[in-house]
Amino acid sequence: MAFPEHLTADILSRLPAKSLVRFSSVRKEWQALIRDPHFISQHLNLNIAKEDQSGRLLVKYRCNVTRKNVISLLLHGTHGYMLSKLEIPSSVMDSHHLKLVGSSNGLLCLAHDKSAHLWSPMILLWNPAIREFSVLPDSVIDSVNDDDNVQVRRIAHGFGYHPLIDDYKVVRIVSLSCFGNAWIRAEVYSQRVDCWQEVNTFHFEIYEHSCTALNGLLYWIAYGRGDRELIVSFDMCDDVFGELQLPDLSFLEIPMCTKLADLKQSLYLIVYTFSGRQREIYAWKMIEHDAEVFWKREWTIGPLLGIERPLGCGLYGEIYMESRKGELVLYNPSSEEAKHIPIRGLRCSLEVHFYVESLVPTKGQHEVLQETNKRIM
């Protein structure tokens, strides 16, 4: 008696992606099922809904010894925290000059951040769970550059997913200059059509290069005309840039740094001091009402000793920070407790990204990769 197909699909959808990849070689029917878009979506949604959040945090840092960039999954078990190091596809990406642009539904976007690659960028999409990566096609902006006098000043990236159009997109923003004149060009890559397209933009200069993806939009902190601070947004559905005003920070009379974060599906502005031995951290929540944007001040943390900077917010409101020793710190605002996790890299090299294991394809090739687990606590 044959086992019902819907029950087989339901059982398989609850298994880890790595197990499913191995099972795909057992039966042709399972191989076809695992590649089915509906099954991939079902498997992803079940993983997102899991209460066990272990393995949901990617930590990127630069090794003190080798100076190479390392990407690891932070796992939480009964015996403490474990690091599961992900082996970057070394055949196409140099880990010395690696930029982790973002993480979305199990896909990671990696870029080469060395200045020699600004005109000819190496960008790839990578799913470490199924060991598949795809190198993106040549940049449109690169292909039309024919003026040796034009200089690239800096490049910012963004990566995310828009559920309405079911598409993953990479945004590349290039700041250019020539004989004292400065301007911006931008392009967007669509995984659905596998090509870049240049898009219209306005005058801004992104200075906080980390990008926050939320509800189909990408956000960066930038300077506008007259060095006015603002938030630049990009709608991945319409491929349109926009701008948002920051809250009034004039009451803060000491130098501050700003950072965007996603906390419980809302955009937050994190503001923190950067001088002296102590850090004070403030947070504003963006509220949209009747097509207008308001900022509500939510909380204040500190002063804290031994903290270098905040890195982001967790799924349950915890704050990830980097210590002055380059360690990862988990801070609970409710209990005001700080837990140090001995992940130590070069100072100011730590990044955190949220991750969920998935079968989402990169539409690329496979590479034999290995993972190593290291108990750290």
Image (spheres, helix red, strand yellow):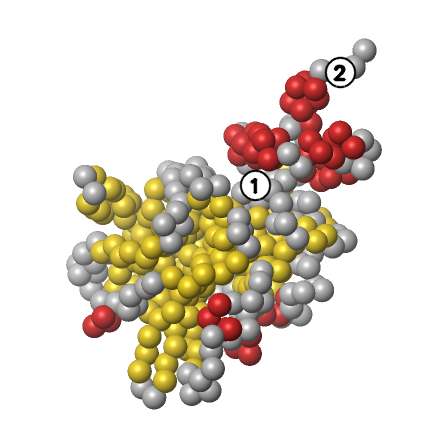
Residue 34, horizontal then vertical, whole percent? 68, 34
Checking the image for residue 332, the label placed there is none
User: Which of the two residues, 166 or 216, is positioned nearer the viewer here?
Assistant: 166
Secondary structure category for the residue under label 1: loop
Residue 161, horizontal then vertical, whole percent? 47, 46
262 to 141, vertically: above or below: above
Mark earlier in primary sequence (1, 2)? 2
70 to 18, vertically: above or below: below
- Marks 1 and 2 close (CB-CB < 8 Å): no
- Please name the residue shown 34% across and 42% down the image: 266
Residue 169, horizontal then vertical, whole percent? 48, 52
The reply to whether residue 16 is in sight is no
Q: Name the residue under label 2.
A: 3
Residue 68, horizontal then vertical, whole percent? 63, 67
The reply to whether residue 2 is in sight is yes
Q: Is residue 111 left or right of residue 278?
A: right
Which amino acid is tagged 2? Answer: Phe
Q: Is residue 75 left or right of residue 102?
A: right
Distance from disc 1 to disc 2, alpha carbons, whole Å, reads 30 Å
- Please name the residue shown 69% across and 27% down the image: 12
Q: Name the residue under label 1.
A: 356
User: Which of the two residues, 271 or 185, is positioned nearer the viewer here?
Assistant: 185
Which mark's residue is nearer the viewer, 1 or 2?
2
User: Which of the two residues, 65 or 108, is positioned nearer the viewer here?
Assistant: 108
- Please name the residue shown 65% across and 65% down the image: 93
Which amino acid is tagged 1? Answer: Val
Secondary structure category for the residue under label 2: loop
The part of the image, by quadrant, that contains residue 21 is: top right
For the residue carrying disc 1, how many other residues have a C-alpha within 10 Å: few (<14), some (14-19), or many (20+)? many
User: Which of the two residues, 67 or 126, is positioned nearer the viewer here?
Assistant: 126
